[in-house]
Image (spheres, rainbow, N blue to C red):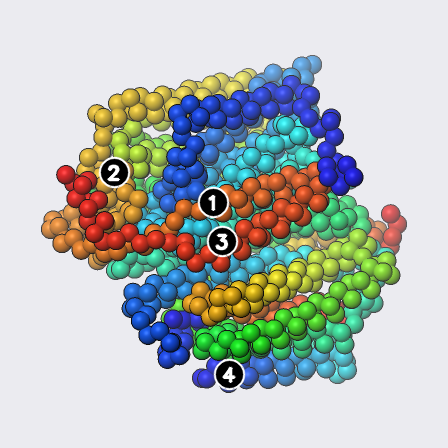
Amino acid sequence: MTDIAGQAAVQPTHFKNAHVSAAHEARTAEKNSKTYFLFWTYLMTDLLMFAGLFAAFAVLRGNTFGGPNEKDIYSLSLVLAETIILLVSSYTAGIAVYAAGRKRIKTTITLLAITGALGAAFLTLELTEFAHLIGEGNSFQRSGFLSSYFSLVGTHGLHITAGLLWLTILLVFLAKRGLSDSMIRKITLFGTFWHFLDIVWIFIFSIVYLMGVSL
Amino acid sequence: MNRVVSYSTGLLLAMMLTITAFSLVLTRAIAASTVIIAVVLVLAMIQLAVQLFFFLHLGQGEDSKWNAVQFCFTFGAVIVVVLASVWIMTHLNYNMTPEQVRQYINDQSTF
Amino acid sequence: MKELLLGRLEWSSLPHEWFTIGGTGALISMALFCVALLTYFHRWKWLWKEWLTSTDPKRIGIMYMVVAALMLFRGALDAIMIWLQQSIAVGANHGYLAGAHFQQIFTAHGDIMVFFATMGFLVGLMNLVVPLQIGARDLASPFLNTLGFWLYVAGAILINMFFVFGGEFAAAGWLAQAPLAELQYNPGVGVDYWIWSLQVSGLGTLLGGINFLATIIKMRAPGMTLLRMPPFTWATLCSSVMIITIFPILAITIAMLTLDRYLGMHFFTAGGGGNPMMYVNLIWMWGHPEVYVLIIPAYGVYSEIVATFSQKRLSGYISNVIGLGLVALISQLVWLHHFFTMGAGADVNAAFGISTELIVIPTAILLFSWIMTLYRGRIRFKSPLMWFLAFISTFTFGGMAGMLLAFPAADYQVHNSLFLIAHFHTMIIGGALFGIFAAITYWFPKFIGFTLNERLGKYAVILWLTGFITAFTPLYILGFMGATRRLDHYTNPSWQPLFIMAALGFTILAAGAAMQVLQVIVSIVQRRKNRDTTGDPWNARSLEWSTPSPVPYYNFAATPVVTSRDAFWEMKQAGKQPKKRYEDIELSRNTPHGIYIAIGAFIFGFAMVWHMFLLAALMLIAMIAFAIIRTFDDDTEYILPASKVKALEEARQA
């Protein structure tokens, strides 16, 4: 059985039932291989969708239409906090995937729960930032810049939300079904998705926030 | 390498790169904005590589070779989308807009 | 309360104009007719089990072809209306169509022909042919395949829903340019129908692209390296990569327009800090590669056909592959040529003018590959090859027109003129559509079991070619004379004879289409005479011809082992029959979840058009729920035991 990296996982010495037929193993490996490829390709399309949003942001970031500009509204300390939180959650997600591959269900659940908590914290910080902006009249309707800002950062936030929803469902099914081959595959996919979101965030904090303040 | 070591190294490196980038901007260590921006982008690229390698294990293992190819292609496409758009749009804005309208785009709420 | 439940639906949204009443009548009649047929012949269960919930790409492929043919007819109705209007609306006569209505017609015509007719045919072909050509039994994800198909159908129905509710379609051109498509200038439901039908079907297309890429990379038969794949599979690979790259851009651009319209944002508005040209930039970043997504599979079809009907292997296979790849790559770097005249300046225009011109090089590589294949071949002039000849003559001419358009300086003269219209119709009809017709004729016996009537097929080619030349040559001339596109009325009387000639061309094209319908009917009547008993009616070269006609649902009794290019041809030359080793075959079960999710998407789109946000939210939840149910279902496949395969094979050979 392989994970998204194609690297063979640890040999299943923890199997209670050793009658895993060779054919079944081969079919699982084949299914994993296809599924990981499909999912990775989908992630590439997601990256391209973000590219469109980045392009729109790059073009519209100066269109303030009399409203606030980037220096006026960014709070770098908040963004730093968000970044660290997301980075750590990406780490815990990775370890969770590793634990799942080694059939350590309790560790997996704990780490996934931590990942979820950190993700929720990230989202809370982001939503307070948005609410604050909207509250003072600088919503996404105010200018082209704010439209593109809310949409780019907001789309990333929507992906985080979707990830948290996915995570919840995974935890529910984990409790019911344990670490079957298909559950391990799903957890691996989730981990990949979560890493991908942190990678997009690298470019958001660099290009939107850090660059915006320095322009 | 052992998976836990891989993830932990990745976390450490990414943390360092992040903090470096933020400190640079927060302390305004360098005056020239173009230089800061360039450094921030380079740090971002390095962190991208770190996360691809240590978290996603890209390119490690048979199946992952295709993933690496796909990623390079997509990354190239992303660069084209963003940079070509900026190039085209700045030219359009500059060449199409007379002075007053350029002002209107940038700051005055005359409408 | 009414607002919450019904959004902005009113009584006045129901049909009350001649064309909305007519359109609604037509839709309802068709639906009733189908219901009557199915009930009378007791075929509801059969339809559900054998076709609608099937994950078999052969079934899905045929369904795509049927829906695409319907949409081709639907788009042709728009074309007829345009032809009629333009042949009479000169001087004092303003024709029979109001200007606003005319705008909706050419918009619908473009969207339906590109998204639903051509894309539908091509994805259908890929479903039918690619798994067989690579020695596989299915696509990488059978579920995504059926989901993609039903999303396509949902989009096709949604784009026609305005007949029943709303009475107006988008009137902003097939790409709904901003700021015309913004609330300020188009507050009605028309643009919203455009938005949601394209988003829903666009998602289906994207899923298809992902699926085909995974299939080709991961599921080839043992021994089939990439450089041993047949050319149509290569073309599918290139198209899939392009779809994967560009459809996210379409999705996000339409999404930004949606945010402007629904949430008052300012991406592309005139004012408020919006930049309408950014819409133009992004939409063409998608739009140009899209037309290459349409033509590249046609190139693949032609490569197959010239090889088979010259009884020779494809000449310059590697150059052909490189040509396909370069066309795919370069076509993603040329989009600005659609707005040369918008003032980007000499540097930008020159760069994109050069990149556009560069496409002629890989295209020429392909052309020479085909010509060299024919050279010294033992040529049989069957109708698929005649479609190829019709293509070569028209497409080369249209391509040269394209080269003229690629010069920014020249483009200033002919941009958005009828010269442009003639150019791209030449490419799509002469290139893609003729390729689709060739493919249908070529592969029909494989999937249906008997060949099409050859004589009527040749008549169809002649009629289509003559009709096309008659209909579009006047447009090239009119373009030079200064006629712009999308004219519902003109004042220069010397143009009218040319418009009339174009309308005459339409009647010949209609005769060609009628001939094709007649061909199908006659072929069905003569099916026993034309039965394909060998599975290889054309003495062809690739693996799909090694199966019986029609193909059994498991495709191959035993997965073939490939040792060279033109795998089947080599097997025939080698002569010996490999010993049959039957194995257990894993196949995908049927699933209704593709349909359920697509129904959810359809209702979601409809609800969003009419601002029925509660219903939309419910549908979103339903779609997610069904997706969860499906993805957490571990029992989606079944095993066909080797003994059963053996029995089926022996029964068939008896």
Asked if the residue at tag 4 contacts the one at tag 2, i.e. Cβ–Cβ closer than 8 Å, the answer is no
Read off the residue under disc 2: C549
**Helix, strand or loop at disc 2?**
loop
According to the picture, the residue beneath numbered tag 1 turns out to be: C592
- Residue at mark 4: B4
Q: Which residue is mark 3?
A: C630
Q: Position of residue C540 (x, y in %)?
A: 23, 42
Q: Are marks 2 and 1 on the same chain?
A: yes
Vertical order, A163 against C235 (above or below) = below
Q: Amino acid at mark 2?
A: Ser
Given the image, on which type of amino acid does mark 3 rest? Arg
Give the Cα distance between marks 2 and 4. 55 Å
The Cα atoms of the two marked residues, 1 and 4, are separated by: 42 Å
Question: Which residue is outermost to the right?
Answer: B110
Cα distance in 3D space between marks 1 and 3: 9 Å
Q: Which amino acid lies under the numbered mark 4 shown in the image of this protein?
A: Val
Horizontal side, residue C622 vs residue A143: left or right: left
Instruction: State the CA–CA distance, disc 3 to disc 4.
Output: 33 Å
Q: Does the rendering let one see residue C521?
A: yes
Give the mark nearer the N terminus: 3 vs 2: 2
Whether tag 2 and tag 1 are in contact, CB under 8 A, the answer is: no
At label 1, the amino acid type is Pro
Kindly indicate whether the residues beneath marks 3 and 4 are on one polypeptide chain: no
* Secondary structure category for the residue under label 3: helix
Q: Residue at x 36, y 21 (%)?
A: C518
Tell me the subunit letter for badge 3. C
Crowd rating for badge 3 (residues with CA inside 10 Å; few <14, some 14–19, many 20+):
some
